[in-house]
């Protein structure tokens, strides 16, 4: 029997696997997601706007109530933008 922590980790891993498969199936998802994040980055409710527009314009669906994997995806997008900004 798995512990609640193990169950949660398995759920996150499964969500991330589905996400990675979608990105590999449609390489425009990554570009679109970063472009959308760039557009809303400075807004007060940036994560909500980013999640909503990514859901509307790609095959990635981020529900209103975010899972750990959704939060991780949004955090990684911000890290990519931070890295990009540091280069220039």
Image (spheres, helix red, strand yellow):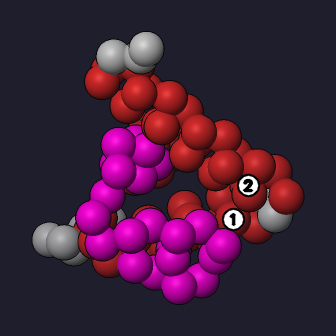
Query: In the rendered structure, which disc, 1 or 2, sits on the residue that comes first in sequence?
Result: 2
Residues under numbered marks 1 and 2 in contact, where contact means CB atoms less than 8 Å apart: yes
Q: Residue at 52%, 70% (x, y): give it.
A: 61
Kindly give the residue lying farthest to the left in the view shown: 44
- Closer to the camera in the image, 28 or 59: 59
Would you name the residue on which mark 2 appears?
Answer: 23
Decide: few, some or many residues near mark 2? Use Cα within 10 Å; few <14, some 14-19, many ≥20: some
In which quadrant is the N terminus drawn? top left
Q: Is residue 5 above or below residue 21?
A: above
Kindly give the residue lying farthest to the bottom in the view shown: 56
Q: Is residue 81 above or below residue 34?
A: above
Residue 38, x across and y down, in percent: 44, 67
Q: CA distance from mark 1 to mark 2?
A: 6 Å
The part of the image, by quadrant, that contains residue 64 is: bottom left
Q: Which residues are magenta?
A: 52-73
Q: Residue at 27%, 64% (x, y): give it.
A: 65
Q: Is residue 18 above or below residue 7?
A: below
Q: Residue at 64%, 76% (x, y): give it.
A: 58
The verdict on residue 66 being magenta is yes
- Closer to the camera in the image, 14 or 28: 14
The verdict on residue 70 being magenta is yes
Residue 73, x across and y down, in percent: 46, 48
Would you name the residue on which mark 1 appears?
Answer: 29
């Amino acid at each position: 029997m798995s512990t609640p922590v193990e169950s949660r980790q398995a759920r996150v891993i499964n969500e991330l696997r589905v996400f990675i498969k979608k990105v590999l199936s449609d390489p425009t998802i990554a570009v679109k997601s970063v472009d959308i994040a760039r557009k809303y980055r400075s807004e007060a409710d940036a994560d909500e706007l980013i999640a909503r527009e990514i859901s509307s314009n790609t095959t990635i669906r981020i529900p209103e109530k975010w899972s750990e994997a959704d939060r991780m995806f949004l955090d990684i997008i911000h890290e990519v933008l931070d890295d990009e900004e540091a280069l220039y």
